[in-house]
Amino acid sequence: MNDLFLRRVDIDWDQIHRNSYLRRIPALGELSGLEFTAPVTLFVGENGTGKSTLLEALAVAYGFNPEGGTKNYSFSTYDSHSQLCRAIRLTRGYRRTEDGYFLRAESFYNVATKEMEYVDPRHPSQRYHDRSHGESFLALFQRRLGSRGIFLFDEPEAALSPQRQMTLLAEIYRSARAGSQFIIATHSPILLAIPGAVLLSFDDGAIHPCTYQETGSYQITRLFINDRERVLRELLADSE
């Protein structure tokens, strides 16, 4: 039995304006529904293929603030989320979440600022602005990840060094094994290696399962590391 917190999403395209840019994103325009089957689902693909757009819509439909945070966060710095969240229907599991968090790397500064306004004696501020960008990300992950939560992360690797990405991989793996669910959009070849994760590629015009070795993140990184001189020579040829 599928005991995930979020089991499926369906899209009613009749709720989307016929001239909406959403219809021009190939991977999304062809999507009517998507089932989640593993504790960790990774969205992978080139920029502009719809990964973040779908992740954001899932988060908002689930009850999270569009700019990120927990379900208790309610603010708007700039209204940039799409109308997709109003056209999707979520199928939830029977278990109740005890925690959850939506991270958008691009708007974390705003969330960290608001966090200082939401404090009380039982929940003191973590003062993320007093840390480096990477340290604040890692502190957030290590504090929030629990055993019965749903976590939606958009490019969580953005502020993390490769070593810290490996730390995050271990944290996600342990939390998922303890009962949490993760849906993550990432370009990181490190995070894409999370054991047992389902990888969904947004490339080639449709969302489809893929292997780790089939991802562009892996292939490009492997090519660069194994044949750096040739790659640089070809990449910079027109600059000389």
Image (spheres, helix red, strand yellow):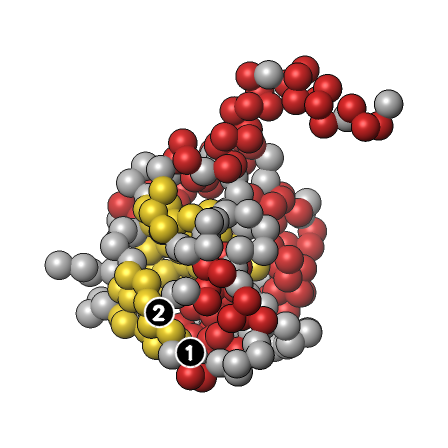
Residue 142, percent across and down? 46, 47
Q: Is residue 191 left or right of residue 181?
A: right
Q: Is residue 92 left or right of residue 84?
A: left
**Residue at x 64% of width, y 62% of height:** 107
Q: Nearer the viewer, residue 25 or 185?
A: 25
* Amino acid type at mark 1: Trp
Residue 170, percent across and down? 40, 37
Q: Nearer the viewer, residue 231 or 96?
A: 231
**Residue at x 45% of width, y 84% of height:** 15
Q: Is residue 147 above or below residue 236?
A: below
**Residue at x 64% of width, y 76% of height:** 79
Q: Is residue 162 above or below residue 43?
A: above
Q: Nearer the viewer, residue 131 or 172?
A: 172
- Pointers 2 and 1 in contact (C-beta within 8 Å): yes
From mark 2 to mark 1, how far is it between C-alphas? 8 Å
Q: Is residue 89 above or below residue 141?
A: below
Image quarter of the C terminus: top right
Q: Secondary structure at mark 2?
A: loop
Local packing at callout 2 (Cα closer than 10 Å; few below 14, some 14-19, many 20+) is few
Q: Quadrant of residue 109?
A: bottom right
Report the number of discs.
2
Q: Which residue is mark 2?
A: 32
Q: Which mark is residue 31?
A: none
Local packing at callout 1 (Cα closer than 10 Å; few below 14, some 14-19, many 20+) is some
Q: Which residue is mark 1?
A: 13
Res 139 visible: no
Residue 93, percent across and down? 23, 68
Question: Tag 1 or tag 2, which sits nearer the N-term?
Answer: 1
* Amino acid type at mark 2: Ser
